[in-house]
Image (spheres, rainbow, N blue to C red):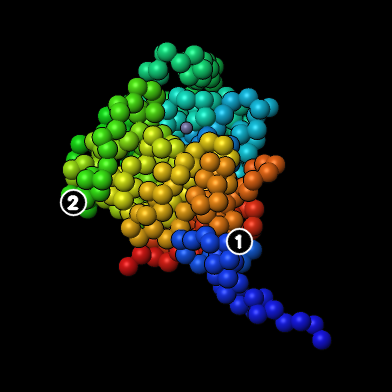
Amino acid sequence: MPGISIFGSYPKLRWQAFFLAVGLSVCSPPITSDASEPESRDTLQIYFVDVEGGQATLFVTPAGQSLLIDTGWPGHDGRDADRIAAVAGKAGISKIDFVLLTHFHQDHAGGITQLAARIPVGAVIDHGENREHTDATTEQIWKDYQRFLAKDNVKRIIAKPGDTLPIRGIQAKVVSSDGALIQKPLRGAGATNPACKSSGPYPADKTENLRSLGTIITFGKLRILDLGDLTSDKEMELMCPLNRLGHVDVYIVSHHGWSQSGSPALVHGIAPRVAIMDNGETKGGSPPSWDIIKKSPGLQDIWQLHFSKEGGIHHNVADPFIANLAGPDAGNYLKVTARKDGSFDVFNSRTETSKHYAAAD
Ligand SMILES: [Zn+2]
């Protein structure tokens, strides 16, 4: 008679036993559902492309419009552009309507030329000119970008805090740009932020990071925050003493989870339900930043694009929540499928499983 595995019959027990055995803590019970990616014309799809510690996040709205936040790195034979084009194909789009560059560092803006050679780009959105002239690489990325804009005669939008981007199907509101911030709290926000007491002070950043073009994206009841690499000194201005952003459901972890960003004032102030970190194996995912997210009130899960070497055994989530484990890179992505009622699923392309998050009360 074949042996019966109690764990095979009770997957949750198996997981709990596993975590007890290895002494890890997890944010909540792991992934429960099926092998398919939830799809619907009524949903907002968000792909978190693995660009090895840079950023490339593709939003495809139910109206069929697309917004790509950042383009990954240059070079590498167009690796990042290939990965972005691949998920665009999965999403069924043949053009990216808007490419938003949060700032001009190479891990965000470096892939624009290679990307445009693979898929048409409708318009670009940025914070205005590069201000970090002392960094030769950044200056080169800026020059390449200028050449691309001139050659293809691409429409360019320079966004300011308070602007709403012209994307159909979602509301994308700019909260930071070129070092400036929204001055008034967003609707429903503006409470005193108790996490300010345990934050800072932080040194004034002098790079392109502090100029990151940050947006809050609203889809029905769901709110998603992306601040690029905005640094903690700016987070304090934005979140203290009054919380100008309010709560969000999904936090696209600032700066790949590096410790120059992601203060308690920001993270605990926005109190996300889920945090998604676009770290690489050797970039981002710093233990102090990871701990701040982990302790955030109301947090259900952290998802990571990569296992973080720096995080080691104590500062990484359980494997099912990681798109790329240690070892040869496979370019696996994470995907959020969101509904207007505020519910959403997170899909891991490595495990081909999803986890469902119910609408908030
Ligand atoms: Zn970056």
Residue 45 vertical placement versus 124 (above, below): below
Q: Is residue 243 visible?
A: no
Q: Secondary structure at mark 1?
A: strand
Q: Is mark 2 within 8 Å of ligand 1?
A: no
Question: Reading the chain from its start, which is encountered first: label 2 or label 1?
Answer: 2
Q: CA distance from mark 2 to mark 1?
A: 38 Å
The disc label shown at residue 161, or none: none
Label ID, residue 353: 1
Amino acid under label 1?
Answer: Thr
On the image, the x and y values in percent for residue 128 come to 37, 22
Residue at (67%, 76%) from the top-left corner? 8
Q: Which residue is mark 2?
A: 191
Q: Position of residue 348 (x, y in %)?
A: 59, 55
Instruction: Name above or below for residue 121 compared with residue 30.
Output: above
Left or right: 14 with respect to 217? right
> Looking at the image, which residue is at 32% across and 36% down?
232
For this rendering, which residue is in front, 109 or 96?
A: 109
Q: Considering the numbered disc 2 on the image, is that residue within a helix, a strand or a loop?
A: loop
Q: Where residue 84 appears, x then y in whole percent?
A: 59, 38
Disc 1 CB within 8 Å of nearest ligand 1 atom: no
Location of the N terminus by quadrant is: bottom right
Left or right: residue 261 compared with residue 118: left
How many marks can you see?
A: 2
| Residue 171 located left or right of residue 196 | right
Can residue 17 be seen from the camera position used here?
yes
Residue 169 position, x and y percent, is: 41, 49
Q: Are circles 2 and 1 on residues that touch, CB within 8 Å? A: no
